[in-house]
Each structure stands twice: as structure tokens, then as C-alpha cells.
Amino acid sequence: MNEKLLRILPNVQKPARYVGGEYKEIIKDKKEVDLRVAFCFPDTYEIGMSNLGMRILYAIMNQMPGVWCERVFAPWGDMEEAMTEHGLPLYGLESGDPLTDFDMIAFTIGYEMSYTNVLNMLRLGNIPLHARDRKGLNQMVFAGGACMYNPEPLADFFDFFCIGEGEEMTPEILELYRKAKKEQWSKEAFLKEVAHIEGVYVPSFYEHVYKEDGRLQEIKIAEGAPERITKRIIQNLDSAHYPTDMIVPNLEIVHDRANLEVMRGCIRGCRFCQAGFTYRPVRPRSPETLLQQAIDSLESSGCHEITLSSLSTSDYRELPKLAEEMLDYCTPRKINLSLPSLRADNFSRELMLKLQQVRKSGLTFAPEAGTQRLRDAINKNVTEEEILETCRIAFEGGWNNVKLYFMLGLPTETDEDVLGIAELVYKILKTWRAHASNKKRGCRIHVATAYFVPKPFTPFQWEKQISPEEYIRRQRLLKENMPSKSIEYNWHAADVSRLEAVLARGDRRLGKLLENVLAKGERLDAWDEYFNYQLWLDAFADCGIDPNFYTVRGYEEEELLPWALISDGVQEAYLKAERKRAYASQTTPDCRTQCSACGANCLLKGGKCDG
């Protein structure tokens, strides 16, 4: 271990974050490696080690002969201070080598508020921030993840971006890089070639031109560069690599359990949900594959809990069969089976009885809106009767705790809709009083509201975000109308969600904002201990950028959007039609009931959209 690191560790919180050496980590002989990748997660060890995408790609890259992928996480504030004081650069967890020793530096970015961490990690690793300042093939910086459907705020800092799913794309990129390195290509030559790998976006090949009023006027495309970048998807998840021989963390992480991805995509089409559109089309794994993956993961890791995950787990067709078979394995071993992402319209008594065989935990549902009119506007496709019936089944089965998630500021929302949340919550409380089989412990209803953020690639990508002041007013209105001791109410901070909207829908001009706020000391923005809204406001003022331009202004439907060259397979005409249906409070059937011809199925070999 590095001598400087040995002196630092006794004086920082959770030193196990920074030492590596975990059971099942991958160590390779440097003499047998010709490509080293630093795989960076822009948050702490506990968050990054819980990230399924990082686990998958770490395993895939390290399966490649001659390639060594190491993990890099953002240090906590005390560790960063100590590293700076002792001159210790950011390093790979497996080898302890500094970022400057790596050929490629990859990031997976799933949350806009981690952008300052991205830049800070490059700075701590002594990597030039701007792509234009990194010459040659060394230290090629690229990124993928959910946020990269609009990568423009980070365009100045990255050599290229990966759009979509990385299981097949990443090895192709690495093999091309090895060829370029062996044949001593220039950086420009490599970027020209990598731009033609499906799903790769090289921002330096595209020039953004703006109008006097600040709107985007034109995107100039360099000769030979793709005119459109379409996301990459995995055709068959059963044949895709899934890491069952996973690293066992040094300390408790956020999701300290085995994770089983049952399917990708979502059949529902909720109009606010970016993931629901960008992960289309739906692709399930077979129950046979899942059962074997579950057993292998549990036996390899020693975990006592396993989660079946997807955007909407209860929409997995084979869930009853899979749950039955998994409980046959889990119950005698006292392993808990967890099913998040349940829907109120398909929660059955049969499923409930299966769930409580090992351990009864709380139930979580997301009605999102308090009135049927607004639920129809956002295409939630769940009724009040279904919500109450679901709660009745749960209460009769012995459950007493329910978590409910809603949004404030959805398009077309009125005060009547806000008060409708309180009315629905009280109806759920009345249902518990009438049907609970276990009233000794009392009822706890946890209500949480989020500040609606209009995201790219949704029917609401053009919408205005309500002002922070209006959000706070609506939040107070709801709080005043839910005074019961049985109800616990929490809400998202307005300032964070406002910044999230700016960065989610922003353009390249935000690069200077990110540099400015980083220079002021901002990082770890997802953590209350470090987030400083005033520093962001000061940075906006310094850069002459009005955050309202990206939030309360909204976008015109015919306006050229910063992410216009990127496609997730869903046609823009479909998104516009869905937006119109939202304003008419008209619902769209789920994908199993009727194909609505959004275009995503065309990404599958032989697939077609025939709504």
C-alpha cells in the first residue's frame, strides 16, 4: 500500500472505502496487460458498489484478455483534503496506481448532480479537464450511463460518450483502442473511427450555433461524422453476461444485497419517466436463467437478501413462477426476497403471501398524482380503486407500513390535484382502520413528494418546470392538509431539483458553469453535508447564465433541442402526440395491451412497430 495512504487512512472516516483488497476483486499481472481502464463512479464507494451497471461492465472488461479494469470512486471531503495535503493523486482501487497511469478513463453517470464530482475526480487525478488539452491517445476520457442521453453540459470535458447499453459496445471500443495504440494512431484518427461504432457520440465533431435570444440555431456536423447517433441495446438478455461472481464490499453499502435484473424496459409509458422511454423496448430474462443467476449470486456472495429489480418488477410475466422457485431456495436458508417497483394495479394476494414467507417489510407504491384526472394526464394507468384494493389486501395480510411517492408540479396540475393527494392518503388510512388484521402496532403511511423535473426523451421534455417558490407553496398546501400522526411527510428540496432540471436539459454553455462552481469548492452535490446552493447561484451570476432559461421558460416544440442528434429509438412525433393526449387527460394503453408504434421495437432485429 502507498506510504502516503498509510499515513492518511487512520485519520479519515470509513478508511475501508479507499483500500481495495475485497473478496473477489480482480487483480491482474501488469506484464500481461496492454490496456488499463480506470472505471470511475462519481460518488462514494457505498453508492458506486451498489450500482448494477458498474458491476456488469467491470466484469465484462476484465473478461477481456490483456485488459485490466479498476474501480475509482469519489473521495469523501476529509479524504480529499488529506490527499491534497499529502500530494496523493486519485488512484485505482485494485493497484493503487494514479489515474495518469491508465490508458482510458471511463465514467458511468446516472445523476445530473454528480457532474461536479466528475470534474473533481479528473482534477484530483491530475487529468486535464478539457478534452482539447489531452493530446495523443493517453488518458482517453469517455462516459456512459442514464445522463448521457443529453451529454451536452459535459461536452467540453469528454472525448466521446456511449449512448445506451454498454455490454457489447464497450468491448468494441476497447478493441479499437488497442488497435490504435498498437499502430500508433493519432487521437483524431481514433476518434474518427470510434464515432462509427453504433451508439458512440464524439462531441468535438459537432459545433453548436446559438441565436441572439440564446436558443440553439444550428448544429454543424463535421465531414464524415454520423448525422444521428442511435442508442445501443442488448437484443437478448439471456445471452448477455451477468456478474454472479461479484465483489464482496469491505463495508456496508447502500444496497447491501444480491441484485437480479429480471428485465429491461417498461411496458407502461408514464409520460414523465425518462427511463421508461430510453430503456425501450421491453426485454425480459427467462425464469430459468434468473433462478440460476440468483443461486449463483447468493452462493458466491453469502448475501442474506436478494432483490428482483427492473423499472416495474410486478409487470414481469413470470413473476409468480419465479418467486415460487426462488422462495423454495431462499426460505430454508433464511434469505429475504425483496420486490421493489410494485404497481398498485397488479399486486395480488397470492404475491403477498409469497413475499411474507421469509420477512415482512414495508410496501412501496408510486401513485404519482392525487386525482384520477392527473394520473390519466401522466398516463399512470392506475385507479384509486386499484390503489385502495391493493392496500386492503396488504393490511389484511398483516402489513402496517406503506410508502407512497407523488410528484408536485406535473403539467396541468392544480391545487385540487395537490389536495387530492391528502384525500387519497386519508382514504388509505381509513382502509387500514377497516381491514387491518394487526392493529396493535398502528399504521404508518410515509408520503414523499418530488419536484417534477422535465427530462429529455419524454413527452414532457418541452414543458416548463414550475418555479421553486410555487413548488414550496404547493408542498405547504399539502402538508397543512395531512395533520394525522399516522402520516409522515417528506419532500425533495426545491433547489436541488431546479439544478437537476438545468443540467438535464442544458447545452454546452453550461460547461463554464460547472468549471466555475467547481473552482468555488462545490462537489458531492447529492449530499446535504456538502451541497451549497448559494455557490451555484454565484456561479450562474459569474457566467451570465439564467437558470430560468432551462427551467420555467420551457421549450417550443419546433425548437432545436441540445440533444437533437441523439435517438433512443422513440420517434419525436410519438412524444408530441403523447403530450397532446396528456393535456386532454387521455391515456395510452400499455405496450402489451396494444403497440402504440413509438418506434422502439424497430431497434430489435426483425422487430417492427405495428400499432
Image (cartoon, rainbow, N blue to C red):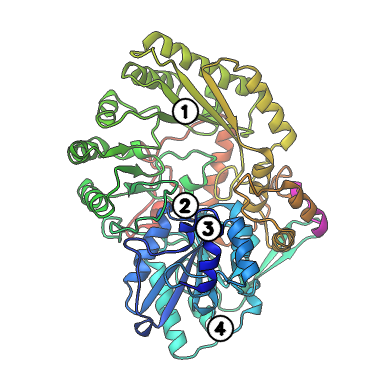
Residue 114 belongs to magenta span: no
* Residue 50 falls left or right of residue 327: right
Secondary structure found at label 4: helix
Q: Amino acid at mark 1?
A: Lys
Residue 73 screen position, x and y as percent: 51, 61
Give the crowd class for mark 2: few <14, some 14-19, many >=20 residues within 10 Å.
Answer: some
**Percent from the top left, x then y, of residue 41?**
50, 60
Q: Secondary structure at mark 2?
A: helix
Range shown magenta: 541-548
Numbered label attached to residue 187: 4
Circle 2: residue type: Glu
Viewer-proximal residue among 565 and 42:
42
Residue identified by numbered label 1: 403
Looking at the image, is mark 4 or mark 3 earlier in the sequence?
Answer: 3
Name the residue beneath numbered marker 2.
46
Residue flagged by tag 3: what amino acid is it? Ile
Pointers 4 and 3 in contact (CB under 8 A)? no
Q: CA distance from mark 1 to mark 4?
A: 51 Å
State the residue position of label 3.
Answer: 109
Residue located 54% across and 34% down the image: 378
The answer to whether residue 611 is seen in the rendering is yes
**Is 387 drawn above or below residue 578 in the view shown?**
above
